[in-house]
Image (cartoon, grey):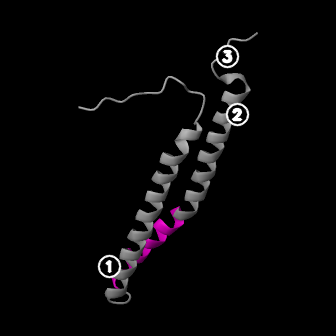
Amino acid sequence: MRTLIFRKDKRGLGIGDIYPSILTIALVAILIAIVLYVLGQFGNQMVNGSLSQNATTLVQQQISNFVPWIGIILLIVAAAIVLGVLINALGGGANSNRV
């Protein structure tokens, strides 16, 4: 069984966190694109106006509504990384016991 390891340093994200964060978000974006493509292909093969085509189109629209949130999530991750770097650079690092 795998145990979770929590970071003791809770001063934000660092430069080393950029790569895994971007890879995760890019993977999610690619998976969403694949799902939308597959749903579009299924919808094109169904009878026009049928319940199944309407349901497929509705699911496709709902997933498409999520896509703009990816940019907002990227912005928040970037801001967290910048704040983490600034906090560490401006005294939040190892010498945080200064008076």
Q: Position of residue 95 (x, y in %)?
A: 67, 16
Residue range corresponding to the magenta coloring: 50-66
Question: Residue, x 66% and y 44% (percent of image)?
Answer: 79
Q: Position of residue 34 (x, y in %)?
A: 39, 70
Foreground residue among 77 and 68: 77
Classify mark 3: residues with Cα within 10 Å, few (<14), some (14-19) or many (20+): few
Question: Residue, x 63% and y 51% (percent of image)?
Answer: 75
SS state under label 2: helix
List the residue tagged with mark 3. Answer: 95
Classify mark 2: residues with Cα within 10 Å, few (<14), some (14-19) or many (20+): some
- The numbered dot on residue 36 is none
Q: Position of residue 36 (x, y in %)?
A: 42, 72
Farthest left residue?
Answer: 1
Foreground residue among 51 and 23: 23
Amino acid marked by disc 3:
Asn
Q: Is residue 48 above or below residue 68?
A: below
Q: Is residue 9 above or below residue 72?
A: above
- The numbered dot on residue 86 is 2
Counting residues from the start of the chain, the first of labels 1 and 2 encountered is 1
List the residue tagged with mark 1. Answer: 52
Question: On the picture, is 99 further left or further right than 65?
Answer: right
Counting residues from the start of the chain, the first of labels 1 and 3 encountered is 1
